[in-house]
Image (cartoon, helix red, strand yellow):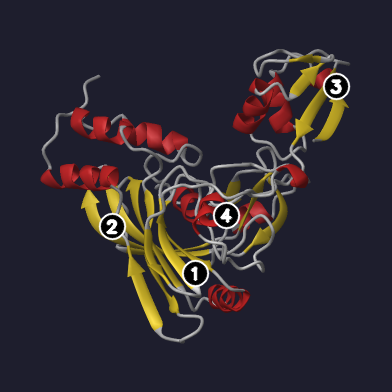
Amino acid sequence: MAQTSFQVEQAESGKRLDVLLAARELGLSRSQAERLARQGRVLVAGRPAAPGRRVAAGELVEVSLATEAEVEPRPEIMPLDILFEDEDIIVLNKPRGMVVHPSPTPSAGRFSRTSGTLVHALLGHTTRLAAGAGPYRPGIVHRLDRGTSGLLVVAKTDSAYQELARQIKRREAERRYLALVWGNLREDHLVIDLPVARRRREPMEMTAVSRLARGEASRQWQGKLRAAHTAVAVLQRLGEITLVEAKLGTGRTHQIRVHLAHVGHPVVGDPVYGLRQARRRRALLGTGTEALVRRLEGQALHAHVLRFRHPTTGQRVTFSAAMPPDMARLVSHLGTGADTPAQG
């Protein structure tokens, strides 16, 4: 178990413990800090502390972080929605709520999930996975956020991994997403070409950086700006919510969510980005629509088309997956136009 410790500074006195940990350069979001504290892995003045504990200047804070040796993925028997499998690849439909693989955060040595990931399920399904992706993500060519559902291709051999990774890097593979977003987009087609970077105060979150912001002396991001390109097409206008298709030109962390929030149309159900716009739009919903939004099991973002060349045969293959039932129910309801206006 890796550990880190620090003393509370005078300017930090009175802060909640979880807020303090998230503000420190530990690579922890506030929710992750809260989880560590509830697991008894955060000590203040030598004693386990609750996430809401107010710290005092001079107190010693000790945080226990998982090491790489503790999170080597082991096989777990879990259901997988496999659309296609042969000796080289697996194409599957990932459910919302499933993390793709244990992953280090910007704080070296700490991993976000040590069981229940897609990798654990894949190891329970087959012993044949590409090692080239790394010891904690065997076979994983590309990822989806935990709250995003949809199509992934997994490599079973290193040669398949290298070829698929090459196609993605050179934008030869095609990845399209369905998203329900807040508001009515003015254009039928929109290209968002803005670099993204990690937020300075929340290193597990991303931000899109405009040219104006890039010239500011006080930056709100840290690390390297990474080019990001998203093409958005309106599929159906549904009042306060719009169904769009987003095509990835690049594959940055949280790219679609960050880009859509930046242009004022965050993904419905997104727990992180564009919350202010979402609250304003949600207040205008009718009671029936608002109830269906509450029932969404995550952000309304689904990878529905995946197209690439088979790494061995060279044949162009296309896979598709219908949107999750909760998204489909919301679209169907909005399409009827029957709803009761929200009161108050």
Please determine whether, in this image, residue 160 is positioned above or below residue 73.
below
Amino acid carrying label 1: it is Gly
Locate residue 118, reporting x and y percent: 52, 51
Label 3 secondary element: loop
Nearer to me, 215 or 56: 56
Of pointers 2 and 1, the one earlier in the residue sequence: 1
- Residue at image mark 2: 322
Name the residue located 59 percent from the left edge and 49 percent from the top edge.
207
Name the residue located 51 percent from the left edge and 75 percent from the top edge.
88
- Residue at image mark 4: 253
Q: What's the CA distance linking mark 2 and mark 4?
A: 23 Å
In the displayed structure image, the side of residue 198 where residue 178 appears, left or right: left
Checking the image for residue 9, the label placed there is 3
Of pointers 1 and 3, the one earlier in the residue sequence: 3
Locate residue 194, reporting x and y percent: 55, 60
Judge depth for marks 4 and 3 and give the one in front: 4
Nearer to me, 257 or 28: 28
Amino acid carrying label 4: it is Thr
Please determine whether, in this image, residue 228 is positioned above or below residue 222.
below
Label 2 secondary element: loop
Judge depth for marks 2 and 1 and give the one in front: 2
- Would you say the residues marked 1 and 3 are in contact, meaning their CB atoms lie under 8 Å apart? no
Label 3 Cα neighbours within 10 Å, binned few <14 / some 14-19 / many ≥20:
few
Query: Quadrant of the rendered structure where residue 62 is?
Result: top right
- Would you say the residues marked 2 and 3 are in contact, meaning their CB atoms lie under 8 Å apart? no
Name the residue located 77 percent from the left edge and 46 percent from the top edge.
69
Checking the image for residue 249, the label placed there is 1
Q: What's the CA distance linking mark 1 and mark 4?
A: 13 Å
Amino acid carrying label 3: it is Glu
Name the residue located 30 percent from the left edge and 35 percent from the top edge.
293
